[in-house]
């Protein structure tokens, strides 16, 4: 059982499914216990060897000692499991200070110190008991110390970026480049469209604080534009080199995301017909959003080219679009909206619905139409296995059905979808029909798996391999970013798909078309999967400022001259959402998680900081949340050295270029903290990882200066350990109750069996007394503390 548990622990850690102080401490506990067990087994075997050489040994003793050999192998397996966890997540870190919005800080700090002492002696005691004494007691102690360590850790949003991630294999192998780029230049574009600043956009001072156009920025030498950590930090390192072409000229940007005529040609080219050339080349058309340009894919070599191969003429053959699904049974007599209502109320069996027939109907809905308006809001009308959304108008529906499809609550999201049996049936069917479904439709079908948290590796592998067959240019901007997000959400790794997606995302024409949400989803995905492609992230450092610098934060939608809007079938126009401060915080964290640094990153950070400052000044309340500017500054602060002398993440790595174009601490120096933190919750203000202490005075150029905060606005060094949510949680109180009972029981046993001198007994009682004090204090605070 121990070996299996350790195997599961190590496997989960290798797939990034475990994280945080809890599992770091649990890994340390398993490592310590296994080490003691291993040493004991080795010692017993050595005793047997010595005794056999001296005199005959009783059979029982010999059998007992021989039994230590397989136990030594089990202990070694446990040692590997614990060690593997620590390799993946690093050693646990204890924090000896607690910050809370209200209450006595000294009491909480004393509680944290007591918890640390409890954890230290519990891990020793629990590890020993786990293998040499009462097994249940040992396991309980390991759990308790893991939970205690979790309480004593920093809050998740403030973890230091010092975890070590090692590659668990090449995945699908190293990828150098799958695209052969066209060397020739396109025809000159009309002024104001094709030549719009896709490389960079400088913020142009105007009375309104924004500009509708930008100037090209002189690029620094490519070698110094962007860099990352050492190769062993990432799960995959791309061979693509950063080589931005300052003279590249793009065709005119689409102003409507594609006209009806362009879409008809796009569908005819890719979905209704197959265009074949010699030597296994097929001709396809890129999505109208990025201009209806032809490209060619070789089904044998896997190469995608935008330059026509000289292999003869094109043969066009029609695709069989007839439906081969037998449309019989009650499932086929209802509309998607009616099916959704029946399934949401739990009456599917009453109507005779089966998982297999529902899966067929789901595939039918997504196979028999070609996408035009490309967002989830259009797919949800056909997606009857999703029980929320705009088309849900039942006033008596369960409250869970009204939750947003985009909710971060995993449990709530799972309740909004059909059961596991339905998804299993869909997986069996989809794996056989991927060619029949448009890539964009398939993306949103997989999205339902991701939001429901349903992981079917065989489907994900099949989908990734299918998309790698030259289909990525046919995807729109939303589906391209969403698909990598799907894989990262489900913690599925496919290096070749991520690399091909990166090469499509940084293609200049595609880069110009990306909207704020696309940048955000892509950064989340690539940073979570530790996939490094310098060319992609350097391109993002140019694409993001282009949208930020050319937008007035007063408006929730982007200017259609900067970024095209969607045009629906009915002629209505849907402009793209502009950046929110929360999105910029997520992107900043993505750069940090990837250890990205250099002038390109700093220029992007500078643009984001300017946008945040303008948003605080101009954005309406509906576009902001209280404390979002503080959260952004906290995340941005991790790129700067602190006033207390602690180096930033970049300087700790020792890889920050000495001749960096800009100093981020200097960039932050003119921020008006009073204005940025105005009306922000005290918790958000306090969580900023500041170089704001010591009177806001820069030290040796490494600190931060700024306007002193307003009265009542407290800015202090972050030490959020036992925050209000944890202190008031049921789990926290239950943990302390268990500690109270354990401490009382141990004290009672020691006193009842006392045959030792009073002084020795008192020293032994110190440990359970500390536990009891911490547990009682923690339970009382958890019960009566009001954040």
Image: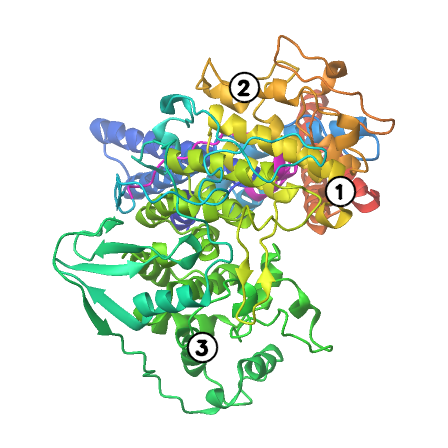
User: Quick check: marks 2 and 1 in contact, CB under 8 Å?
Assistant: no
The secondary element bearing badge 3 is classed as helix
- Report the magenta residues as a range: 142-170
> Crowding at label 1, few (<14), some or many (≥20) Cα neighbours within 10 Å?
some
Pick the front one: 644 or 194:
194
Q: Which residue is mark 1?
A: 626
Disc number lying in front (2 or 1)? 2
- Classify mark 1: helix, strand or loop: loop
Crowding around mark 2 (Cα neighbors within 10 Å: few <14, some 14 to 19, many 20+) is some
| 743, 334: nearer the viewer | 334
Q: Where's residue 200, x and y in %?
A: 49, 33
Q: Is residue 403 visible?
A: yes
Tell me: 112 left or right of 52: right
Mark 2 vs mark 3: give the one in front: 2
Circle 3 residue? 365
Q: Which mark is residue 55?
A: none
Image position of 268 (left or right of 615): left
Which residue is located at x 23 percent, y 31 percent?
A: 52
List the residue tagged with mark 2.
662
């Amino acid at each position: 059982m121990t070996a299996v548990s350790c195997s599961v622990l190590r496997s989960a850690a290798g797939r990034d499914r475990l994280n945080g102080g809890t599992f770091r401490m649990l890994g340390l506990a398993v490592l310590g216990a296994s080490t003691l067990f291993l040493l004991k087994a080795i010692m017993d075997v050595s005793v047997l060897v010595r005794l056999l050489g001296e005199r005959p040994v009783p059979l029982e003793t010999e059998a007992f000692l021989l039994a230590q050999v397989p136990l030594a192998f089990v202990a070694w397996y446990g040692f590997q499991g614990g060690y593997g966890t620590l390799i993946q997540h690093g050693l646990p870190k204890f924090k000896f200070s607690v910050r809370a919005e209200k209450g006595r800080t000294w009491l909480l700090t004393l509680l944290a110190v007591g918890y640390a002492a409890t954890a230290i002696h519990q891990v020793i005691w629990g590890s020993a008991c786990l293998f040499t004494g009462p097994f249940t007691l040992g396991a309980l102690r390991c759990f308790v110390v893991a939970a205690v360590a979790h309480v004593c850790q920093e809050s998740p949003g403030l973890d230091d970026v010092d975890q070590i991630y090692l590659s668990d294999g090449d995945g699908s192998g190293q990828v150098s480049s799958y695209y052969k780029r066209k060397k020739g230049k396109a025809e000159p574009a009309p002024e104001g469209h094709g030549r719009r600043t896709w490389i960079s956009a400088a913020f142009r001072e105007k009375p309104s604080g924004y500009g509708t156009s930008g100037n090209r920025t002189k690029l620094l030498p490519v070698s110094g534009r962007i860099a990352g950590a050492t190769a062993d930090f990432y799960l995959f390192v791309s061979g693509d080199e950063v080589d931005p072409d300052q003279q590249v000229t793009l065709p005119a940007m689409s102003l409507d995301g594609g006209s009806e005529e362009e879409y008809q040609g796009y569908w005819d080219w890719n979905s209704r017909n197959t265009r074949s050339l010699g030597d296994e080349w097929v001709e396809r058309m890129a999505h109208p959003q990025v201009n209806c340009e032809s490209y060619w894919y070789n089904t044998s070599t896997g190469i995608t080219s935008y330059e026509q191969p000289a292999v003869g003429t094109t043969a066009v053959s029609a695709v069989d679009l007839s439906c081969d699904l037998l449309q019989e049974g009650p499932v086929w007599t209802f509309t998607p909206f009616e099916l959704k209502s029946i399934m949401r109320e739990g009456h599917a069996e009453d109507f005779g619905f089966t998982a297999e027939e529902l899966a067929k109907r789901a595939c039918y809905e997504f196979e028999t139409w070609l996408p035009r308006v490309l967002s989830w809001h259009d797919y949800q009308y056909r997606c009857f296995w999703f029980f929320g959304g705009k088309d849900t108008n039942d006033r008596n529906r369960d409250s869970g059905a009204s939750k947003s499809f985009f909710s971060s609550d995993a449990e709530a999201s799972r309740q909004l979808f059909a059961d596991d049996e339905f998804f299993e049936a869909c997986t069996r069917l989809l794996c056989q029909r991927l060619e029949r479904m448009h890539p964009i439709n398939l993306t949103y079908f997989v999205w339902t798996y991701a939001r429901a948290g349903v992981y079917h590796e065989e489907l994900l592998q099949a989908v990734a391999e299918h998309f790698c067959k030259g289909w990525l240019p046919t995807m729109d901007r939303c589906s391209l970013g969403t698909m990598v997000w799907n894989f990262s959400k489900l913690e599925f790794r496919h290096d070749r798909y991520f690399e091909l997606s990166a090469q499509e995302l940084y293609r200049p024409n595609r880069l110009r078309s990306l909207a704020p949400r696309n940048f955000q989803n892509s950064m989340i995905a690539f940073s979570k999967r530790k996939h490094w492609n310098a060319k992609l992230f350097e391109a993002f450092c140019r694409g993001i400022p282009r949208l930020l610098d050319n937008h007035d934060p007063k408006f929730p939608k982007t200017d259609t001259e900067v970024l095209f809007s969607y045009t629906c079938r009915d002629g209505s126009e849907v402009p793209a959402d502009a950046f929110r401060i929360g999105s910029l915080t997520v992107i900043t964290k993505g750069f940090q998680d990837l250890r990205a640094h250099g002038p390109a990153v700093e220029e992007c950070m500078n643009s984001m900081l300017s946008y945040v400052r303008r948003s605080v000044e101009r954005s309406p309340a509906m576009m902001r949340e209280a404390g979002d500017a503080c959260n952004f500054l906290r995340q941005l602060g991790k790129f700067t050295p602190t006033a207390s002398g602690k180096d930033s993440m970049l300087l700790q790595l020792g890889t920050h270029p000495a001749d960096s174009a800009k100093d981020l601490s200097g960039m932050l120096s003119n921020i008006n903290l009073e204005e940025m933190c105005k009306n922000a919750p005290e918790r958000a203000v306090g969580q900023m990882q500041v170089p704001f202490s010591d009177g806001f005075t820069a030290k040796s150029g490494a600190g931060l200066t700024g306007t002193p905060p307003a009265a009542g606005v407290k800015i202090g060094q972050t030490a959020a350990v036992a925050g209000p949510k944890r202190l008031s949680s049921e789990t926290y109180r239950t943990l302390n109750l268990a500690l109270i009972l354990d401490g009382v029981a141990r004290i009672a046993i020691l006193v009842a069996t006392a045959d030792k001198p009073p002084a020795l007994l008192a020293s032994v009682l110190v440990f359970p007394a500390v536990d009891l004090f911490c547990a009682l204090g923690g339970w009382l605070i958890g019960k009566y503390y009001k954040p």
